[in-house]
Image (spheres, rainbow, N blue to C red):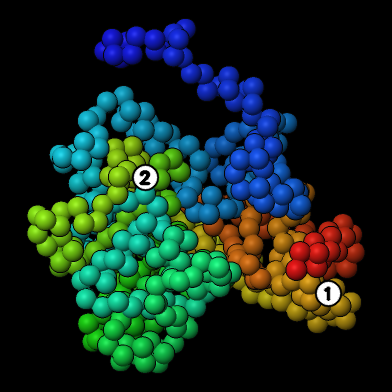
Amino acid sequence: MTKDLYPGAGPGGAKEFDLGRLLAERGAERYELHARHLNHQLPRMLRTIGFDKVYERAEGAYFWDAEGDDYLDMLAGFGVMGLGRHHPVVRKALHDVLDASLADLTRFDCQPLPGLLAERLLSYSPHLDRVFFGNSGTEAVETALKFARYATGRPRILYCAHAFHGLTTGSLSVNGESGFRDGFAPLLPDTAVPLGDLDALAAELRKGDVAGLIVEPIQGKGVHETPPGYLRAAQELLHRHKALLIADEVQTGLGRTGDFYAYQHEPDVEPDLVCVAKALSGGYVPVGATLGKDWIFKKVYSSMDRVLVHSASFGSNAQAMAAGLAVLAVMDDEKIVENARVTGELLKSRLAALVDRYELLSEVRGRGLMVGIEFGRPKSLKLRGRWSMLQAARKGLFAQMVVVPLLQKHRILTQVSGDHLEVIKLIPPLTVGEREVERFVTAFTAVMDEAHSGGGLMWDFGRTLVKQAVTHR
């Protein structure tokens, strides 16, 4: 059939497209192409910190370069690669759905895959009833904001200071980091409250115009958990004032914290809307989902005239739905949530045991395989002087000094948890185990030993970072 419809297609045909040949011929230009045609600051930044690597292939929690050296991934594509890279079950599902030649995205039918994925997702949150599928985390948040406003008839959303909910305009309006918001005003009239501050929440609710509170059960920026009991108390306050609780589980959801959703760590918390994305994709096809209560959806889609009042052109596409179904099957079959809990406890305990050993190491916190390592002001005079030099130039430089040798010397990819933060965030694939924990802790210990020796290439690199920071103020 394909040859009849596309007579030039196929091996040797005039319409042949050879992806392998294109990559072989042009792949070495990757950094130059990006600098010329995309975000020119990205390759510049990567070269500055020595992250301009060339990775040839990836599998599970590892990359390999052209020399065959392996790199441990403790970043998971900012959490997208929950099952690691190229999980065979997800790969097969995508091959199968492509080979099925489904009549996808006709816009005027109801395909089975979206309903099946919604059914599976909702089984993990029995108090929720319906799902809207979009294409990303920020789109899932945008959906929740719109639905909360429409369902309550109120304009204002509350969010927590230092939150990150996305970078599109609506999501940016509830982003608690000024560095992302600066220069993009006017935004929506939403209001920040301190994380964990119930009095501040109550004061805003008394104004009578609040549609809801959106909150990450564990903030990605800095890895800060909501205080024990906060989510349940906030939920009670919100419902008393006829407002909604929105849980942003884009990064914390799907097993990351040792439960399927992070809000489930606290008893009796039942958000009205839940946003998920990232790991649901299997690392292949962008997907976002907003789960909600029946009455909210029925209010938004209140009549046939409103059937398309909120939609997404690529939402519910067959490839994304197949990837999501495969991901959830793997999570159950391979006990991914349990592994995240057990391995996360091991990683956190091994790192926490180092706090008393290193004066530059302040705290280890987090849940499951979402772990924050925070650095702080040392006590010894020599180290204190070096620390102060970095802080005067730009807060966050010491954490960057740790991230760089982890990659350069130990071939482990990590990230600083946010701008102006002395925190490294670990969000590895949820499939890692004792071997990866041992490799990371051994490497981290070696880097801390070097940092506390007071000399060497690590502090030389620190001086380079200081010069960069001062130059670009």
Is residue 81 visible to the viewer in this orientation of the structure? yes
Question: What amino acid type should be assigned to the residue bearing mark 1?
Answer: Met
Asked if residue 284 lies left or right of residue 465, the reply is left
Q: Position of residue 43 (x, y in %)?
A: 68, 46
The residue sitting at the top extreme is 12
Asked if residue 234 lies left or right of residue 11, the reply is left
Q: Residue at x 75, y 68 (%)?
A: 473
Is residue 407 visible to the viewer in this orientation of the structure? no
Q: Residue at x 57, y 53 (%)?
A: 75
The image quarter in which residue 447 lies: bottom right
Question: Which residue was labeled with disc 2?
Answer: 327
* Disc 2 to disc 1, C-alpha distance: 46 Å
Q: Residue at x 66, y 71 (%)?
A: 420
Q: Is residue 391 depicted above or below 61 in this figure?
A: below
Q: Residue at x 54, y 37 (%)?
A: 59
Q: Nearer the viewer, mark 2 or mark 1?
A: 1
Question: What amino acid type should be assigned to the residue bearing mark 2?
Answer: Val
Asked if residue 300 lies left or right of residue 164, the reply is left
The image quarter in which residue 213 lies: bottom left
Q: How many marks?
A: 2
* Local secondary structure at mark 2: helix
Q: Position of residue 237 (x, y in %)?
A: 29, 86
Which of the two discs, 2 and 1, labels the residue nearer the N terminus? 2
* Local secondary structure at mark 1: helix
Question: Which residue was labeled with disc 1?
Answer: 389
Which quadrant would the N terminus be assigned to in this image? Answer: top left
Q: Position of residue 105 (x, y in %)?
A: 25, 37
- Between residue 355 and residue 219, name the one nearer to us: 219
> Alpha-carbon neighbours of circle 2 within 10 Å: few (<14), some, or many (≥20)?
many
Q: Position of residue 266 (x, y in %)?
A: 36, 75
